Amino acid sequence: MDEKLKQEGLHIVVVGHVDHGKSTVIGRLLYDTDSLPQGAVDKVKRIVRETGKPFEYAYLLDAFEEEQKQGITIDTTQIQFVTKKREYVIIDAPGHKEFLKNMISGAANANAALLLVDAKQGVQEQSKRHGYMLSLLGIEKVYVVVNKMDLVDYSEEVFHKVAEDMKAFLEPLGVKPLRYLPVSGYQGDNIAAKSANMPWYDGPVLLDSLDLLEASKEILDKDLRLPIQDVFKFDDRRIIAGRIEAGKLAVGDEIAIYPSGRRTVIQSIAYWQERDKKERALAGESTGIIVRDEFFNQRGEIITTPGAKAPHVSNRLRASIFWMGRNPLRKGSTYKLKLATQEVEAEVADIVKTIDAANLDSREGAKELRLNDVAEVILSLKEAIAFDVFQEHQATGRFVLVDGYDVAGGGIVIAAEKADEGAGFAFVNGGIRARGDVFDEFYYDIESYNVTKVAAAVKKPYQVGDEIPRRGISYEYPADFDILILRDQVAVSVRQGRIESILPLADYEYSGRPLINGRGFGIKVYKAKELKEMLSVYRELASSHVEPRVKAAFANRYFFLNQYRHLQFYFDYVI
Amino acid sequence: MAMDHLDQLEAESIYILREAYKKLGKLGMLWSIGKDSTVLLWLAKKAFYGHVPFPFIHVDTKHKIPEMIAYRDRVAKELGLDLIVHTNWEAIHAGIGPDKGRLACCKALKTEALRQVVKQHGFDGLIVGVRRDEEGSRSKERVFSERTQDDGWDYTNQPPELWNQFKTDFPKGNHIRVHPILAWSELDIWEYIRRENIPIIDLYFAKNGKRYRSLGCACCTGQIESEADTLDKIIEELKHTKTGERAGRKQDQEDAYAMQKLRKEGYM
């Protein structure tokens, strides 16, 4: 047993059309191998006793009252399970179309999948949709399990027909099932023990088939990818924390940090307990490193090894996405994109084509995506980020889209598109670039009570000599003022409505003119000495981990609304 | 060299704790003194290299097993924990207790007490040591699980949670229950305690043929027959046991869906 635990665990998701018996097969597998938490069995026995219903293996997983009453799986669950060879996590996923987001939540965590098909009903809509989702999620190890063989008199002919149908759908998607198995979850045929009802099947039973899966080790051989999760400064050490998503690192290694590409050397790996002291760390580990050169690092940056293939850095990417949102995704709308530990505003620049996951028909020219739609899109990001193509690095090549408060979409990167030069920057002067929302409109939405920022229509960055718009719907700036863009450490001076200079903030001298920040808020600074003080507090805040409340206190101390920038009431800002 | 099962669980839990710390505003960790929250404390120390950058919260029902309170105060002092102890005195003064019905008692002294402490301190995130294998409604949980202003849990419409992209956007007033050890089993917890040599309250070790397998209020928590007085023996016992972990917790037995009902309203 202890030897077994040394083996790496494998996560297996069970998918397929509603009522094709996913929960039953899992329940049976767990029951026959005596690997259920006893509390679960006791509870099902109790429910059976109280309701007078027959014992259902599915109840072992369908724990919600609503699930048992309706006889369907609503939400995904995971359960541990041990065989002679290794530890497994079996993930049950709902088959009902309405709960596709829950199926995806389950399947996204899997290394391998069992795609269940009812022998009597054959391949159905969700069998296909789930097969398609497996290909999109990058799950390559797939077994097709033909269930309910008892309902077709254990017919070899029916089994082959169903297997062929599934194969015909999956192969064009690049999903090549490793094995096809005939089983009956309800009767226990070919689950844990060989069935006498199907002498024509000479392959391994389901239980043994799981042990034949090989855990993928290639993640360790890939180039290093360590997205920075946080930078800790609890004591005199400055620890860059994150989980290694691919490859490995060691003390003394030279590293490059993207998007900037700056290089430094790993000085040590942080630890708390003496037994955790180490010189190397591998993919999968949540680690913390201390580097030689202390330059400004922040969450979202990706650490790799120089010489290896670097991540792409761009503000445009092409992706396959699936939409799980209640509201449709609209072309031209913006969402928050979360990729590894990076977060950036993303505009849907184009919906290239939509794909019907049930028959693979594709259609061009769509203006929006609805619940459960799949599409290829071009996303334009507010600023350049580091990322990979999903085929090369899964963890840094996939993302979710957040609509309002909710994760509403998921996607994988197909390709980096050529960066839109200067896009995402409000001000450019040679190599000096600064972001800024100075000309964006700020609306207070009277329906949702949220403040919404709508990007200015002009996409081209402003340069020295350009005239700037001084009045918008929600802003009004004087003829002479200076803009201090703190996050990019750039100062922009405006005189007579034109940009006079764009400088690094370090070279800026206080001019006595009104100051505003990168969002158009006034800055409560009226002396050179006060400015110096504010900038030093800002640098302290930006270079260490502080709670949002501390940042808010800084903002309240130094920024003000209502003179240059104000909020405009609005409802339905989608134009 | 490759990571084993416990290494994988540990790395995942640390990632979750760091994510909560970075992305949620005011954070607190529920500490029940039991084995799960003790492992959670250990993981937090690992995640933040010996520092624990948030307070601990103990919801004291005043019905706890007395040894638990003594242990709590001793450990909090030894580790210098920032500990918030909260009791729903109003309910106690109003006469609520286990004799008024177990679910009503749990609701007032645990669920409502928890709601009070969340409101009082304005927590945006609450780290809780629940595990999927404990009971059914927990098996369906998300790692970052949103609760409304009145602590409601909309379990039939949970948000997608994929690729470790957790729910970090939510309206002010709601809070997130963070579940870093959701994927751990009871056996994983004990094997990790053994591997890491984590100090643990001795109520779990058998004395006179009995031990606690799960800790709670004295009135509603039963002991099991056991000779397991060492970590090795506990682990061996669990590999062969035929009873559920929470079989000794009387509130679970009130109704087949008792936990689902309690948790829908904010129970941990």
Image (cartoon, helix red, strand yellow):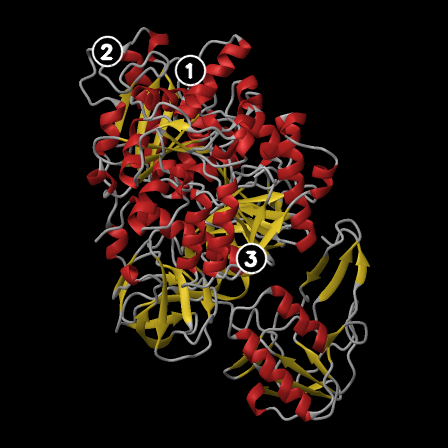
Q: Which residue is mark 3?
A: B55
**Closer to the camera, A521 or B199?**
B199
Gap in angstroms between the C-alphas marked 2 and 3: 60 Å
Q: Chain of mark 2?
A: A
A158 sits to left or right of A421: left
**In the current view of this chain or complex, which residue is farthest to the left?**
A202
For label 1, the residue is A121
Chain letter of disc 3 in the image = B
Q: Which mark is residue A198?
A: 2
Task: Tell me, yes or no, whether dots 1 and 2 are on the same chain.
Answer: yes
Q: CA distance from mark 1 to mark 2?
A: 19 Å
Tell me if A368 is positioned left or right of A544 in this view. Answer: right
Under mark 1, the amino acid is Gln
Left or right: A537 as drawn, with respect to A189 = right
- The image quarter containing residue A452 is bottom right
| Quadrant, the C terminus of chain A | bottom right
Along the line of sight, the residue nearer the viewer: A406 or B82: B82
x and y percentages locating residue B228 in the rendered image: 31, 33
* Label disc, if present, on residue A208 of the rendered structure: none
Residue type at mark 3 is: Pro
Type of residue at label 2?
Met
User: Which label lies toward us, 2 or 3?
Assistant: 3
Q: Is residue B200 above or below residue A259?
A: above
Front residue of B16/A91: it is: B16
